[in-house]
């Protein structure tokens, strides 16, 4: 019953408990580089901000690819894990940038618990003892993110071009709110953020923030292209018997409005910059669902209704046989809850579906 696609180099793998059948699922919309080709005179005004840089390998590849095309970004990298400090310091120096060894936060100088220490920048929590959900947690110093960013932006002057990749395992909510209220969020050309509301009980209530960011920051006068990566339903974390979807989530678990990032332009609203990629296909799209005549832009268009264009979900395709031809799966990357609750019956390469995975290859600056 499981359909198969080619293009294996771009797709992740999925297996079912019924046997060795496999099908290929497309990578999500990539975090494509800056909007439009920048003028020659603007070069040297580029800043790449990495919050949760880990060991810096992803950032190095991105910086080198853009430098080879004549777009030399200066990195500003944040990472609290001391294991990665030497590599990040070397990377920052190689591109005349700056490495900040600490956990980016709204305030500096605090001793806070870092979850998932040793793997990423982690989630910093207010706890009075050393207990946590993760045995690899440890205490780190925080650094005030906004003043450092403001200082770097002032060095660039007007007409600067700033992009940010944020994967800090939960700290994104407080940091982004701080940047918005302090007037810095609209300084970016693009923001890629991996959100984590459903992975930590203390953050579950922040789930609605995920989908509002592209709409909020894509407003006329701000024009930030926001890519939200919230692959909650396909994350391998649910295979751990200790981690379960919130039992009291009720109907919210199956509501696509909580998972499909909202486009910057809505019916009756002000027109936005046409270059905003998130105004067409959402970052949560599943490309194999679509074909000529039934494109993502058509099917996922919220101006046609809360489930996009209903005609898209009644046509006959392989997805019908799987029970997955729906707005929920194709536009919001939602799986039926019985598959999430029985996560061992299904295995998806969630890393292969991350929005950031193809950012370098599809960067508009490199075309």
Image (tube, rainbow, N blue to C red):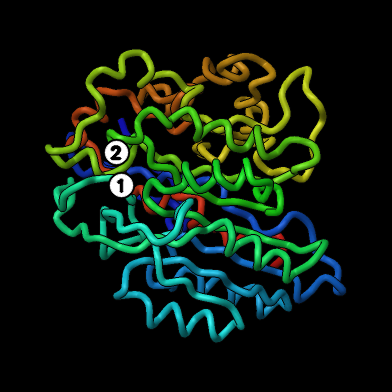
User: Which residue is at a point 25% across and 60% down the rendered structure image?
Assistant: 139
Vertical comparison of 13 with 333: above or below:
below
Marks 2 and 1, how far apart at CA: 11 Å
Tag nearer the camera, 2 or 1? 1
**Marker disc for residue 68:** none
User: Which residue is at a point 34% across and 34% down the rendered structure image?
Assistant: 198
Q: Is residue 124 left or right of residue 241?
A: right
Q: Residues within 10 Å of mark 1 (few under 14, many from 20)?
A: some
Q: In this view, does 283 lie to the left or right of 245?
A: right
Task: Quadrant for residue 150, please give it.
Answer: bottom right
Vertical comparison of 182 with 335: above or below:
below
Q: In which quarter of the image is the N terminus?
A: top left
Q: Of callouts 2 and 1, which one flags the residue occurring earlier in the amino acid sequence?
A: 1
Residue 67: percent from the left, percent from the top?
A: 66, 78
Residue 272: percent from the left, percent from the top?
A: 79, 35
Say which of 20 and 198 sits in front.
198
Task: Quadrant for residue 320, please give it.
Answer: top left
Say which of 170 and 1 sits in front.
170
- Determine the secondary structure under disc 2: loop
User: Which residue is at a point 45% across and 50% down the rendered structure image?
Assistant: 354
Q: In which quarter of the image is the C terminus?
A: bottom right
User: Which residue is at a point 73% across and 78% down the rendered structure image?
Assistant: 70
Q: How crowded is mark 2: few (under 14 residues within 10 Å), some or many (20 or more)?
A: some
Vertical comparison of 79 with 30: above or below:
below
Residue placed under numbered mark 2 in the picture = 200
Residue placed under numbered mark 1 in the picture = 125
Can I make out residue 67 in this image? Answer: yes
Residue 264: percent from the left, percent from the top?
A: 69, 33
- Determine the secondary structure under disc 1: strand
Say which of 182 and 298 sits in front.
182
């Amino acid at each position: 019953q499981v359909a198969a696609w080619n293009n294996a180099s771009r797709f992740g793998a999925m297996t079912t408990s019924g046997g060795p059948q496999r099908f290929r699922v497309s990578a999500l919309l990539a975090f494509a580089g800056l909007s439009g080709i920048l003028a020659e005179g603007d070069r040297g005004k580029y800043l790449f901000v990495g919050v949760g840089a880990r060991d810096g390998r992803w950032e190095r590849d991105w910086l080198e690819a853009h430098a080879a095309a004549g777009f030399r970004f200066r990195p500003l990298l944040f990472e609290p894990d001391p294991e990665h400090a030497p590599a990040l310091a070397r990377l920052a120096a190689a591109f005349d940038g700056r490495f900040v060894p600490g956990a980016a936060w709204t305030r500096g100088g605090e001793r806070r618990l870092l979850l998932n220490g040793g793997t990423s920048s982690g989630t910093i929590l207010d706890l009075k003892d050393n207990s946590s959900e993760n045995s690899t947690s440890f205490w780190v110093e925080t650094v005030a993110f906004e003043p450092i960013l403001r200082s770097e932006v002032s060095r660039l002057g007007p007409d600067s071009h700033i992009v940010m990749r944020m994967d800090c395992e939960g700290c994104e909510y407080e940091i982004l709110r701080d940047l918005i209220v302090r007037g810095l969020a609209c300084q970016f050309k693009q923001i890629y953020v991996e959100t984590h509301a459903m992975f930590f009980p203390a953050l579950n209530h922040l789930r609605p923030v995920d989908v509002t960011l592209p709409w909020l920051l894509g407003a006329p006068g701000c024009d930030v292209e926001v890519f939200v990566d919230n692959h909650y339903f396909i994350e391998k974390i649910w295979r751990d018997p200790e981690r379960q979807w919130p039992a009291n989530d009720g109907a919210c678990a199956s509501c696509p409005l909580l998972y499909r990032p909202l486009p910057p332009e809505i019916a009756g609203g002000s027109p936005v910059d046409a270059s905003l990629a998130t105004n067409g296909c959402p970052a949560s799209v599943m490309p194999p669902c679509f074909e000529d005549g039934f494109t993502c832009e058509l099917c996922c268009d919220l101006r046609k209704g809360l489930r996009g264009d209903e005609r898209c979900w009644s046509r006959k395709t392989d997805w019908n046989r799987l029970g997955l031809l729906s707005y929920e799966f194709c536009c919001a990357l939602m799986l039926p809850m019985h598959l999430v609750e029985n996560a061992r019956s299904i295995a998806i390469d969630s890393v292969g579906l991350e929005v950031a995975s193809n950012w370098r290859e599809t960067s508009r600056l490199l075309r």
